[in-house]
Image (cartoon, coloured by chain):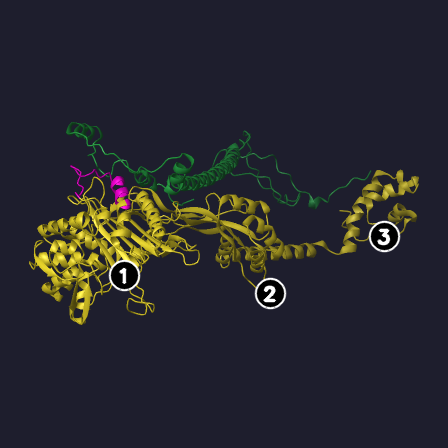
C-alpha cells in the first residue's frame, strides 16, 4: 500500500484549536494557512502565551432572528392570503347582493306595472260589467247630512265633506318614499 | 495529484480495457466493470482496489484530453449566462419602465369594463297618483355578425321564439350576414325590448353571436287612456309627442357609469378598479288629469260621436278655480274602418275651429262690462237683417221682436248679438276676445299647440266685423273656448289652463307646479250677471238638454259652420258642415267644473245643433265629474222650472 507523503516545504503548520482570549488587548489568534517558518532556518517567532479559554458561545441570536423573520414572513404571507381570500369572498358576496338588488328592483318595477294595469279602468270596468254583472248607476240618490253628522265625520276623519282629496288613489305618496332609494345602480 | 500528471499509465489502461478497444471509445468508466462482467471476463471482476482507484483518477485526465481545458468553457458559459441574465434584466426593466404604461393600458383594457347605467325615465301620474306612463326594464337581443356562424340557421332558430314571419326572418338573416370579409359590423339588433320569457328562451338557444342586454321600455298601463295627451317615446326612450316631448328634458334622467375590473368569468376583481357614478332618475310628472274621469269621458265621447254619426269630437273638463284640466278627450272616425277611435293627436289643443255661438258670451260680457248694456237692455231684433253687404238670418225663425240681452243670448240670436257688438265697437270686441284667451296660446305649452286665428280689429273686413261677435271669422282651440267659459265661471278672472300639477324630484320630494297665470277680465257683478244669463240658456234657451238633476247648470250652445280647406263654408253641392258645441259650468252658484263638448261634423239633417248633440254629452260627462270630485248637489234642488224637453 503506497503511502503518500508531502515534501517538507509544502507542509504547513496546523494551528492549534482556536483559542481566542477574551481579553480585548490580547492578540487574536486564528488558524492560519501561512507557511510555518522553515525548520532550521534561523529564529523562530516567539509563541504568544496561550491560555485556555472557554469555547466561544454559539451565536444563536442571529439564528433566532432569521427564524423569527421567516416566521413573520410566512405568517405575513399567510395573513395576506387570508385577507385576499376574504376580499375575494366579500367581493363575490357584494356582486351577488348587487345582482339581487337589481333583480329586486326589476321585480318591483314589473309588479308596479302589473298593479297599475290591474288598477286601470280598462281592466276594472270590463271585469265589473262582464264578469260581475255590475251596471253604472243611472239615478244616484244623494243624501244631505245634517250639520251634526257633518261635524262628526269631519272630526273623525279630518276631512271636510265633499273634499275631493278623500278616497283618491294613494300611489303617489308611497312612490315619493321609495323613489329616493330606487335607481338603476347595480 | 496523480490525475494532474500528464500522460497516463498505458499498461494499466490497456490491462483494464483488455480487448475492448481504446478507452476513449468507451467513456463510461464506472460502467466498464459491469460491462466486462457482462462479457464474461473474470479478470475484471478480480481487479485490485488500487487499480480501481487508479482508474477513477484517470477519468478526468481523459476528459481533459477529450474536451480541452474546462476553465475557458466555464467562463464562457458564465459570460453567456450573465449576458442572458443581463438581457432578461434589461427587458424586465424596460417592461417595468418605458413600456409599462402601454402594457398596463392594454391589460386594463382587457380587464376594465365601462358600463353605462341607464337612468330611469320619470313616470307620469294622474292627480291621484295612478301611473299613466312608466318605464320598465326589458331585454334587448342583439347580434355580433362577426360571430354568427350560420346567419340563416340562427334566424330560423330565433323566428319561432320572436314570432317572426318568413319575411321578417329573411330580413333578420340578412342583418346577421356579413356582406364581405371587410364587413366589420359588430352590432345588429335582433329584437328590442322583449319580455323576460322571450329573453330566457333566446338565452336557452345558446346561439353563437347572439347576446342580450337590459333596456328600459315605456309602458302606459291604461293602454289608450289619455294617449293623445301623454304622447309617446321612441325605442330609445326619447319623447316624440305630447307631454313626453314637452317635458322630455325633465323626464330624462342622467345616465350613470360603472367602471370595474373584472375577471374572465365576469366577476369583479377584488381591490381592482371600481368606480361607479350612479344614474340620476328623471323627475316625475303629476298631471292634473283624473284617470277615472278621463276614462269615462273618452268612452262617453266615442259613444256619442258614434251615436250621432259625427266625424269626431272633443271634450275638455276643467277645474274652475285652478284651470286644472281634469279630462281631455279626442275622438275621430277612422276613414278606413268607419269606427270611431280615440285620436292620437290632442285635437283639443292643436286643432282650431270656429266656435260659433259659444263666443257670444264674450260679446255679451264685454257689453255688460263696458256699460253698453245691462241684462235687461232691450233691442228690437228682426229675423233677418243686413250687416255690411250681407243679409243675416237667425237660426230659429222669429218675428221682429224686442229682445233683452239675456234673451239674445238665451235664444242665441245672431242678429241680436251683432247688434250688441255694433254698439260695443270693433276695438272693444277684439280687446275682450283676446282677454278671454282667443288668438293667444293658452299657456299649456303643449307641442303643436295652436294659437287660433283672431285678426286685428282694423283688419276685419266686410261682414267679418260682425260675424266675430257670434263666433264666425275667428278660430279657437277647444281649450281656448273652455277657458273663455271658465272665465265667467271663475267670477270674471281668466285662469290659464294647466296640465301639470307638480313634479317629483329625484329625492322623492313633490314640488308643486306654479299656479296658472290669471288676469281679471270681468268684474264680479258682471260675471254674476253673465252666470244668470247662461242659466237662462240652460233653463229656457237653446241649452235645455244640458240640465242635470240636482245641480244648477250655466252654459251656452254653439253651432258653427266648419270652414272648408278651399275656403268658404259651402261645398259644390250647397252643403255645409258644422261644429256643434256646448260649454258650461256646474254648479252655477259655486262653480267647480267647466266642461266643453264639441262634436265635429254632426249630420246636417237638423240634429246638428249644439243643444242637441253636444249638450247631452255635457250632462253625462259633468255628472261623472261631479261624482268623481264628490261635489254635492245644489241645496234645494237647483234645477230649472222648465224641463229639458219642454220648449
Asked if the magenta segment contains residue B640, the reply would be yes
Give the image location of residue A1, x and y in percent.
Answer: 82, 38
Quadrant of residue B628 in the image?
top left
**Residue indicated by mark 1:** B353
**Residue indicated by mark 2:** B180
**Nearer the camera: disc 2 or disc 3:** 2
In three-dimensional space, the C-alpha distance between marks 2 and 3, rounded to whole angstroms, equals 67 Å
Q: Which residues are magenta?
A: B620-641
1 or 3: tag closer to the N-terminus = 3
Which class describes the residues within 10 Å of circle 1: few (<14), some (14-19), or many (20+)?
many
2 or 3: tag closer to the N-terminus = 3
Tell me the element at label 2. loop
What colour denotes chain B? yellow
Tell which subunit mark 1 falls on: B
Give the image location of residue B343, x and y in percent.
Answer: 36, 54
Q: Nearer the viewer, residue A1 or A56?
A: A56
Which class describes the residues within 10 Å of circle 3: few (<14), some (14-19), or many (20+)?
few
**Residue indicated by mark 3:** B25
Q: Give the left or right position of residue A182, taking residue A50 as reference.
A: left
What colour denotes chain A? green
In three-dimensional space, the C-alpha distance between marks 1 and 3, rounded to whole angstroms, equals 121 Å
Asked if the magenta segment contains residue B232, the reply would be no
Which class describes the residues within 10 Å of circle 2: few (<14), some (14-19), or many (20+)?
few
Amino acid at each position: 500500500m503506497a503511502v503518500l507523503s508531502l515534501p517538507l516545504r509544502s507542509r504547513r503548520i496546523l494551528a492549534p484549536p482556536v483559542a481566542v482570549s477574551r481579553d480585548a488587548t490580547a492578540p487574536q489568534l486564528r488558524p492560519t494557512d501561512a507557511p510555518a517558518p522553515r525548520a532550521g532556518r534561523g529564529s523562530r517567532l516567539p509563541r504568544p502565551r496561550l491560555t485556555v479559554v472557554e469555547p466561544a458561545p454559539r451565536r444563536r441570536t442571529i439564528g433566532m432572528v432569521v427564524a423569527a423573520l421567516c416566521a413573520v414572513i410566512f405568517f405575513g404571507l399567510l395573513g395576506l392570503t387570508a385577507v385576499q381570500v376574504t376580499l375575494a369572498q366579500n367581493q363575490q358576496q357584494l356582486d351577488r347582493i348587487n345582482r339581487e338588488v337589481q333583480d329586486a328592483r326589476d321585480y318591483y318595477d314589473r309588479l308596479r306595472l302589473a298593479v297599475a294595469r290591474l288598477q286601470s279602468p280598462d281592466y276594472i270596468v270590463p271585469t265589473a260589467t262582464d264578469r260581475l254583472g255590475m251596471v253604472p248607476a243611472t239615478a244616484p240618490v244623494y243624501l244631505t247630512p245634517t250639520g251634526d253628522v257633518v261635524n262628526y265625520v269631519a272630526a273623525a276623519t279630518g276631512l271636510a265633506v265633499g273634499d275631493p282629496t278623500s278616497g283618491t288613489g294613494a300611489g303617489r305618496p308611497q312612490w315619493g318614499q321609495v323613489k329616493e332609494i330606487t335607481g338603476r345602480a347595480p | 495529484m496523480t490525475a494532474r500528471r500528464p500522460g497516463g499509465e498505458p499498461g494499466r489502461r490497456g490491462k483494464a480495457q483488455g480487448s475492448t478497444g481504446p478507452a476513449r471509445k468507451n467513456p463510461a468508466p464506472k460502467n466498464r466493470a459491469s460491462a466486462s462482467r457482462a462479457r464474461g471476463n473474470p479478470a475484471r471482476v478480480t481487479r485490485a482496489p488500487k487499480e480501481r482507484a487508479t482508474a477513477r483518477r484517470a477519468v478526468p485526465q481523459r476528459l481533459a484530453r477529450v474536451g480541452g481545458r474546462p476553465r475557458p468553457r466555464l467562463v464562457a458559459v458564465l459570460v453567456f449566462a450573465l449576458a442572458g441574465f443581463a438581457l432578461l434584466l434589461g427587458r424586465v426593466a424596460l417592461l417595468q419602465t418605458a413600456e409599462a404604461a402601454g402594457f398596463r393600458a392594454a391589460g386594463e383594457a382587457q380587464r376594465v369594463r365601462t358600463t353605462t347605467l341607464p337612468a330611469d325615465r320619470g313616470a307620469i301620474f294622474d292627480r291621484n297618483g295612478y301611473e299613466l306612463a312608466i318605464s320598465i326594464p326589458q331585454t334587448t337581443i342583439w347580434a355580433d355578425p362577426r360571430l354568427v356562424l350560420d346567419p340563416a340557421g340562427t334566424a330560423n332558430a330565433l323566428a319561432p321564439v320572436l314570432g317572426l314571419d318568413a319575411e321578417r326572418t329573411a330580413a333578420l338573416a340578412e342583418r346577421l350576414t356579413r356582406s364581405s370579409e371587410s364587413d366589420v359590423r359588430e352590432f345588429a339588433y335582433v329584437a328590442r325590448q322583449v319580455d323576460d320569457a322571450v329573453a330566457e328562451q333566446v338565452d336557452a338557444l345558446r346561439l353563437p353571436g347572439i347576446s342580450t342586454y337590459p333596456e328600459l321600455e315605456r309602458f302606459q298601463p291604461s293602454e289608450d287612456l289619455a294617449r293623445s295627451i301623454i304622447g309617446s317615446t321612441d325605442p330609445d326612450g326619447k319623447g316624440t309627442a305630447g307631454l313626453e316631448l314637452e317635458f322630455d328634458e325633465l323626464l330624462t334622467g342622467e345616465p350613470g357609469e360603472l367602471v370595474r375590473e373584472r375577471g374572465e368569468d365576469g366577476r369583479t376583481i377584488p381591490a381592482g378598479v371600481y368606480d361607479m357614478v350612479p344614474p340620476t332618475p328623471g323627475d316625475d310628472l303629476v298631471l292634473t288629469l283624473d284617470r277615472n274621469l278621463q276614462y269615462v269621458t273618452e268612452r262617453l265621447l266615442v259613444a256619442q260621436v258614434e251615436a250621432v254619426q259625427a266625424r269626431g269630437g272633443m271634450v275638455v273638463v276643467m277645474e274652475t278655480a285652478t284651470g286644472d284640466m281634469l279630462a281631455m278627450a279626442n275622438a275621430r272616425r277612422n276613414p278606413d274602418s268607419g269606427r270611431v277611435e280615440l285620436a292620437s293627436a290632442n285635437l283639443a289643443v292643436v286643432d282650431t275651429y270656429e266656435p260659433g255661438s259659444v263666443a257670444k258670451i264674450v260679446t255679451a260680457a264685454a257689453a255688460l262690462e263696458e256699460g253698453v248694456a245691462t241684462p235687461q237692455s232691450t233691442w228690437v231684433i228682426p229675423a233677418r237683417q243686413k250687416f255690411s253687404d250681407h243679409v243675416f238670418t237667425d237660426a230659429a225663425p222669429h218675428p221682429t221682436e224686442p229682445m233683452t240681452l239675456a234673451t239674445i243670448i238665451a235664444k242665441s240670436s245672431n242678429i241680436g248679438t251683432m247688434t250688441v257688438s255694433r254698439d260695443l265697437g270693433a276695438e272693444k270686441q277684439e280687446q275682450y276676445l283676446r282677454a278671454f284667451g282667443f288668438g293667444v296660446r293658452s299657456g299649456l305649452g303643449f307641442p303643436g299647440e295652436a294659437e287660433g286665428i283672431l285678426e286685428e280689429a282694423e283688419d276685419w273686413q266686410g261682414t267679418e266685423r260682425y260675424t266675430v261677435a257670434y263666433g264666425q271669422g275667428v278660430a279657437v282651440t277647444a281649450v281656448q273656448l273652455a277657458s273663455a267659459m271658465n272665465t265667467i265661471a271663475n267670477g270674471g278672472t281668466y285662469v290659464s289652463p294647466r296640465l301639470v300639477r307638480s313634479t317629483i324630484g329625484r329625492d322623492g320630494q313633490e314640488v308643486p307646479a306654479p299656479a296658472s297665470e290669471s288676469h281679471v277680465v270681468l268684474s264680479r257683478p258682471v260675471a254674476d250677471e253673465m252666470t244668470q244669463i247662461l242659466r237662462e240658456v240652460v233653463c229656457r234657451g237653446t241649452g235645455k238638454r244640458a240640465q242635470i238633476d240636482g245641480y244648477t247648470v250655466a252654459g251656452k250652445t254653439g253651432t258653427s259652420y266648419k270652414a272648408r280647406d278651399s275656403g268658404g263654408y259651402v261645398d259644390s253641392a250647397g252643403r255645409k258642415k258644422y261644429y256643434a258645441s256646448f260649454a258650461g259650468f256646474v254648479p252655477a252658484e259655486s262653480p267647480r267644473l267647466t266642461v266643453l263638448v264639441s262634436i265635429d261634423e254632426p249630420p246636417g239633417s237638423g240634429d246638428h245643433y249644439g243643444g242637441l248633440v253636444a249638450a247631452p254629452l255635457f250632462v253625462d260627462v259633468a255628472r261623472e265629474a261631479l261624482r268623481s270630485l264628490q261635489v254635492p248637489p245644489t241645496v234645494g234642488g237647483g234645477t230649472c222650472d222648465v224641463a229639458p224637453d219642454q220648449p
